Each structure stands twice: as structure tokens, then as C-alpha cells.
């Protein structure tokens, strides 16, 4: 479906199948996409502020430069997704699967990433200031040049991760 530029703000899309849909420049502010299937969807430059994507499937979706401020992505599957330059200020990603996702230069200030899976994720030059990464799985992730000031990392798994200074965490 081609929904580029569509205004779907405050729309109820619970369980909707929007796989491979084009929602570029779309407005989904406060939309409810709980349990929705958006695998391979194209959401580049979309406004997704305060949208509810809890338990949604967004595998291999494109969310470059998307605005996800205060969105709910609890337990969402974003494995293989691209969110480069996306803004996720105060976004709830608790328990989300971001395995092998591309999050370069994404802005996660004050985001909740507790128990999130970021195995082999690319977070090059990402901003994670004041993000909550407690018990997150960052094994093999690339955080080169990332900003982690005041981030909470208690219990985070960092084995094999490239740290902001370029060193690799061995234990």
C-alpha cells in the first residue's frame, strides 16, 4: 500500500498488516499500532510521536529520520530495521528486539531501553545521554563515537561491543 504523506494521526490500526507499506512522510502521531505488522515498511521521515507500537513487528523496516518522541515500542521487533538519524527522545523500547539494526546517529535521550536486545546493532555516533540501558543486551554492538553521558548501564551485556572510544569490551 502506498500511504506516503498520509495523515493517520490518532488512527486505530491495532493488528493491522502494513508489511512493505510506504508511509514516507506520513503522520501517525498518537496512532495505535499495537500488534501491527509493518515488516519491510518504509517509514522514512514519518512523524510517529506518541504512537503505540507495543509488540508490533517492524523487521527490516526503514525509519530513517523518523520522529519517534515518546512513542511506545515495548517488546516490538525491530530486528534488522534502519533508524539512522531517527529521534527517539523519551521513547519506550523496553524489551524491544533491535538485533542487527542500524541506529547510526539516532538520538535516544532519556529513552527506556531496559532489557532491549541490541545484539550486533550499529549505534555509531548515536546519542544515548540519560538513556536507561539497564540489563540491555549489547553484545557485539558498535557504539563507536556514541555519547553515553549519564546513561544507566547496570547489568548491560557488553561482550564484544565496540565502545565509544573504539576499544572492544572483552568480558
Image (cartoon, rainbow, N blue to C red):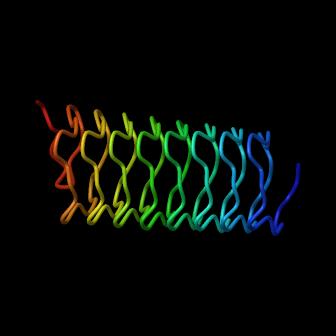
Question: Which quarter of the image is occupied by the C terminus?
Answer: top left
Q: Position of residue 44 (x, y in %)?
A: 66, 60
The quarter holding residue 115 reads top left
Q: Position of residue 5 (x, y in %)?
A: 81, 68
Q: Establish if 156 lies above or below 8.
A: above
Does residue 120 appear left or right of residue 75 in this picture?
A: left
Count of numbered marks: 0
Q: Position of residue 159 (x, y in %)?
A: 20, 32
List the single residue furthest toward the right.
1
Image point (42%, 62%), residue name: 105
Q: Nearer the viewer, residue 70 or 151?
A: 70
Q: Nearer the viewer, residue 37 or 85?
A: 37
Image point (69%, 50%), residue name: 33
Does residue 159 appear left or right of residue 77 in this picture?
A: left
The quarter holding residue 149 reads bottom left
List the single residue furthest toward the left.
171
Does residue 54 appear left or right of residue 22 in this picture?
A: left
The quarter holding residue 89 reads bottom left
Image point (42%, 39%), residue name: 95
Q: Nearer the viewer, residue 24 or 28?
A: 28
Q: Establish if 110 lies above or below 141.
A: below
Q: Position of residue 103 (x, y in %)?
A: 45, 52
Amino acid at each position: 500500500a502506498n500511504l506516503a504523506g498520509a495523515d493517520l494521526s490518532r488512527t486505530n490500526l491495532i493488528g493491522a498488516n502494513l508489511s512493505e507499506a510506504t508511509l514516507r512522510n506520513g503522520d501517525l502521531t498518537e496512532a495505535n499500532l499495537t500488534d501491527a505488522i509493518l515488516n519491510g515498511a518504509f517509514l522514512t521521515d514519518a512523524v510517529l510521536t506518541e504512537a503505540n507500537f507495543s509488540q508490533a513487528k517492524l523487521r527490516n523496516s526503514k525509519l530513517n529520520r523518523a520522529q519517534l518522541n515518546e512513542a511506545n515500542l515495548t517488546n516490538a521487533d525491530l530486528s534488522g530495521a534502519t533508524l539512522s538519524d531517527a529521534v527517539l527522545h523519551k521513547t519506550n523500547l523496553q524489551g524491544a528486539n533491535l538485533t542487527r539494526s542500524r541506529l547510526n546517529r539516532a538520538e535516544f535521550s532519556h529513552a527506556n531501553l531496559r532489557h532491549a536486545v541490541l545484539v550486533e546493532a550499529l549505534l555509531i555516533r548515536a546519542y544515548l545521554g540519560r538513556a536507561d540501558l539497564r540489563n540491555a543486551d549489547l553484545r557485539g554492538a558498535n557504539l563507536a563515537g556514541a555519547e553515553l553521558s549519564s546513561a544507566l548501564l547496570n547489568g548491560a551485556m557488553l561482550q564484544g561491543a565496540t565502545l565509544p572510544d573504539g576499544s572492544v569490551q572483552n568480558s
